[in-house]
Amino acid sequence: MKTRTYFLPALTLLSAAVLAQPVFAAECTPPEGIRLVNSGVLEMATNPTLPPLQYVDGEGQLKGMRIELGEDIAKRLCLKPHYTRIEFSAMVPGLKGGRWDMINTGIFFTPERAKLMSMIPYESQAISVSARPADAASITKIEDLAGKSVGVEIGGFEEATLREISKKLVAEHLKPVDIHTFDNFTVAFQALRAGQMSAVVTIDALAADYQHRGMFRQVISGLNPTPVAIAFADPKLADAAATVLNQMKADGSLTALFKKYGVSMTPGTFKVQGPSS
């Protein structure tokens, strides 16, 4: 199967943005024993191309559910939130290389990834297929993707899911999916709008947002529901963040945030899963 990447204008995501700093009480101090890239700061990496969960508004400010969640976690840890906007493919190497403390971009949880870093599954997301309105009637089931050109962000769970779909179609004696990978979903959807793709595979929330704005149709949804996580280099920092998430769940603030954006929460208590778990 040949994979090609189309080169279209893309957002520049390598700049850093400092979010509004919370005001701490005098007695508020960060947890002892945590390791940070910069003292007193929670350095987070995000890829703001997934509205309404993480995106850049018209004034260039980071917005969305996951952005707010990161701010809340930092505030409760008595740290200042700081985001670096970066492509997904660079996030894990950057975490391992000490460029940031936390990946906050909706990274899908897998046991393989948990061997590399400390992860806290907290959100449930499934996969969708989006198409242009004019083409929506021609894609109503997975089998309709056979032989079609489909775009996806490179290196993520979405790409892995799409490749599994393609293998399944071949096993059913249908044509494989013509998969095209992109640095981010913004570029993938640009290619779809330009007619260079028949469809794009992404998460349900993003596909629903594009449909709500009348740009594309969410023709298939709910595929392969999987936990989404935040990830950390330092296990002690991950433990502290898990404690914060459970506190937010207990006081209702986390439920309110998820309800605001129509996102599903993973059941039970939030726990760290990582190399030492």
Image (cartoon, rainbow, N blue to C red):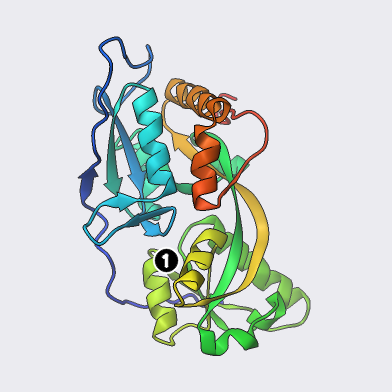
Residue 172 in the image, given as x and y percentages of width and height = 78, 77
Is residue 38 or residue 56 the one in the foreground? 56
47 to 236, vertically: above or below: below
Identify the residue at image location x=72%, y=83%. 174
Name the secondary structure under disc 1: helix
Q: Position of residue 56 (x, y in %)?
A: 30, 57
19 over 55 or under it: above or below: above
Which residue reaches farthest right?
A: 172
Left or right: 153 as drawn, with respect to 223: left
**Residue occupying image coordinates x 60% and y 78%:** 177
Q: Position of residue 204 (x, y in %)?
A: 57, 61
**Is 209 left, or right, of 167 in this rendering?**
left
In the picture, the quarter occupied by the C terminus is: top right
Q: Residue at x 31, y 14 (%)?
A: 28
**Count of numbered circles on the image:** 1
Indicate the quadrant where residue 60 lies.
bottom left
Q: Is residue 160 above or below residue 20?
A: below
Q: Residue at x 48, y 65 (%)?
A: 209
What amino acid does circle 1 point to?
A: Phe
Q: Does the image show residue 96?
A: no
The quadrant of the image that shows the N terminus is bottom right
Pointer 1: what residue?
185
Q: Nearer the viewer, residue 199 or 277?
A: 199
Instruction: Examine the rendering and report whether any part of residue 93 can be seen.
Output: yes
Q: Picture coordinates of residue 98 (x, y %)?
A: 31, 34
Q: Quadrant of residue 268?
A: top right
**In-image side of 215 versus 112 (left or right):** left
Nearest the eye: 254 or 239: 254
Q: Is residue 264 above or below residue 205?
A: above
**Neighbourhood count class around disc 1 (C-alpha, 10 Å): few under 14, some 14–19, many 20 upward:** many
